[in-house]
Amino acid sequence: MVANVMLVSIISLSSIGAASAIILYFIAQKFKVIEDPRIDVVNEMLPGANCGGCGFAGCRNFAEAIVKATDLSDLNCPVGGNAVMTDIANMLGKAAGTKEPQVAVVRCNGTCENAPKKVQYEGAASCAFAHALSSGDSGCPDGCLGLGDCVASCKFDAMYMDPVTCLPVIIEENCVACGACVKACPRNIIELRNVGKKSRRIYVSCMNTEKGGVARKNCSVACIGCFKCEKECAFDAITIKNNLAYIDYEKCKLCRKCAPVCPTNAIHEINFPPRKEKTEKTTEITEAV
Amino acid sequence: MGGVHPPENKISEKAAIEVLSLPQKAFIPLGQNLGAPAKAVVDKGASVKVGQLIASGEAFISANVHSSVSGKVARIDDVLDHSGYRNKAIVIDVEGDEWEESIDRSPAVIRECNLSSEEIIQKIKEMGIVGLGGATFPTHIKLMVPTGKKAKCLIINGVECEPYLTSDHRLMLEKGEELIIGVTILMKALKVEKAFIGIENNKSDAIENLKRIAADYKGIEVQALKIKYPQGGEKQLIKALIGREVPSGKLPLEVGCVVQNVGTAFAVYEAVQKNKPLIERVVTLTGKSVKKPANYLVRIGTPVNNLIETSGGLPEKTGKIISGGPMMGKAVVSTEVPVVKGTSGILIMNEKESHRPLMSNCIRCARCIGVCPMGLEPVLLAQLSANERWEDAERERILDCIECGSCHFTCPSGRPLLDYLRVGKNKVGQLIRTRAKKI
């Protein structure tokens, strides 16, 4: 009797299982999502940081876009760089675009010394909040607030807040130009600029659009929009708009002529060798014997 | 529902209104109201008289700006406001005190008003009257009832629930008759037969004074209210006086009433009966360390420094200077900032009072939820705001927040809830505006 019950249960459960398996197989076939197998391959080739620097929602999303695109010239992974894009393009049989490597640049030099604090901010420690509540502790409404929203957004350990200057510092070797800090800054102080030949670049380290006299009151190294640099530049790379100079990194030839004419030292040159000092001709005084 | 009991500190309530001396330079911003700033109609070098129109409110939600001094326009320039940002203002070098001839400067009280409702509203618009309770919403727009809605009563806010501030209190005591006439004019503009004036119990002399005067006028009822912050909030006042609750996201007209501050009612009296535009207002100067707490009648555009100097100068160990009260006011970055239409008081806090407690983690005590007068959950809204989840914050009704500060005041962990809410409301507001543009 017992053996009979056991046999019946085994057979009935097995047949239910088999029937379900067959039904599921057919349903799986009918509703199968057909995906291009190349998407997975491309995804493996990408760095996998999911930083969003490409403009897509993660590496997989970017892989889909690459496979679907006919022209790869606009698609670029800042973390992998041109090397990764070329490998992927070769694998897919398409032509890769090349993009100049870029790096994040903090365009403000309002250190605690240059832009002394005039009021004390005691609210939530976030730049987005401080920006919404007041113009900041130095009085410059366009300058760095020093509360570190940018540093917090960096996933590549490429930023830290300098405690002496109260400004964020970019560690060039680690920066992949993903753009997270650019988005995090409520005042658009950080910009992605070309790394430049031999890692050299020149930029105006100020975002202040107030009239020169007003800007200078709050910060000793503010750009006052005096036009001296624009006049000096032989390559039309500098434009003054709203009392503020801007150097176009595509046009800049790194000739270094603009930086010394700036009366407030607002133009910064990075990774250049030190300038040669001009020696004055001296006249020797001979004593009468 | 909700509410807190901050210490009242009405130090300046016995100080009679004192006329403040004229400044040497007046800095009159073009944007002193909710809505679009006005456009300047005078040029550099122009001579202006007190009461002359210097900027015209052209957008729908905008207000006219008049000169509060006589002299020459020095420049039209960016001037510091309380937050440290600069906005366009007309700077006038003050010469003498010449008024426009059309303004009636006599102290006689004029009781009769023979203008029609539309004429009254037009006059209020011309005279640049905005809500003096602090929100500075252009009054003429509030009085224009849209078709489909009907106003059944007028509510006058004499509560002044913010600690330290006493300008409304003094106005009710010293200019009671003019105030009540202003109320009747507003009633005529709205075409209503009934008005309620709500005053908190801590101002018993004002309640008595207004009750006595209102007895001679039809339809005005003065009611004493329990002391609780924020009793002066529009929606809280409506609930207390007529027992109706304004639905979320809607205006008081939804329950048939319009709310105006006592200061606005007085300004309306002066505008309609005396042809006087909004060029001066009562500002309380107060603080525990201030040598002479006072209520000054100040011309718009006077630098805050003038009030501080007249009251004995900045006390030693001053920590903060606040435009407004300790609950909803905003700290100013410099004493050069001018008094504007919305400045109800300047509070000087000493260092000990000024420091914010150290911010630590939320302990989920739910006190903020208990005190919110609008029935919101500040702990949730602040968290959504901090994580930039704007659509979720909108869904959780962050826009219903009246920024009273009760949650911030109560939090035992020192979390800056009001700051988070203000930023959240700003961002959600922007989101809604961009959505509207796309459609």
Image: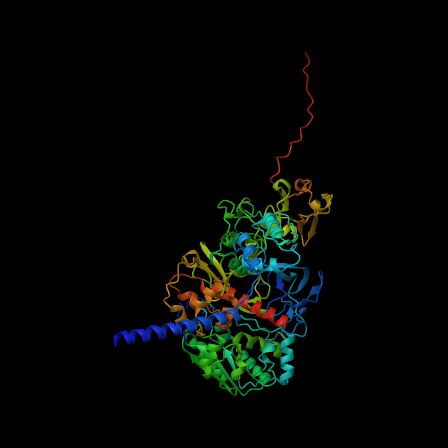
Of residues B132 and B285, the one nearer the viewer is: B132
Q: Residue at x 43, y 73 (%)?
A: A19
Image height check: is A86 above or below B398?
A: above
Q: Residue furthest left?
A: A1
What is the x, y in percent for residue B84?
Answer: 56, 58
Image height check: is B39 above or below B121?
A: above
Count of numbered badges drawn on the protein: 0
Q: Is residue B174 visible?
A: yes
Quarter of the image where the N terminus of chain A is located: bottom left
Of residues A280 and A66, the one nearer the viewer is: A66
Of residues A91 and B224, the one nearer the viewer is: A91
**Horizontally, is B83 left or right of B96 in the view?**
left
Image height check: is A204 above or below A67?
A: above
Q: Is residue B163 visible?
A: no
Of residues A43 and A282, the one nearer the viewer is: A43
Q: Residue at x 63, y 81 (%)?
A: B120
What is the x, y in percent for residue B342?
Answer: 55, 68
What is the x, y in percent for residue B78?
Answer: 63, 59
What is the x, y in percent for residue A46?
Answer: 55, 53
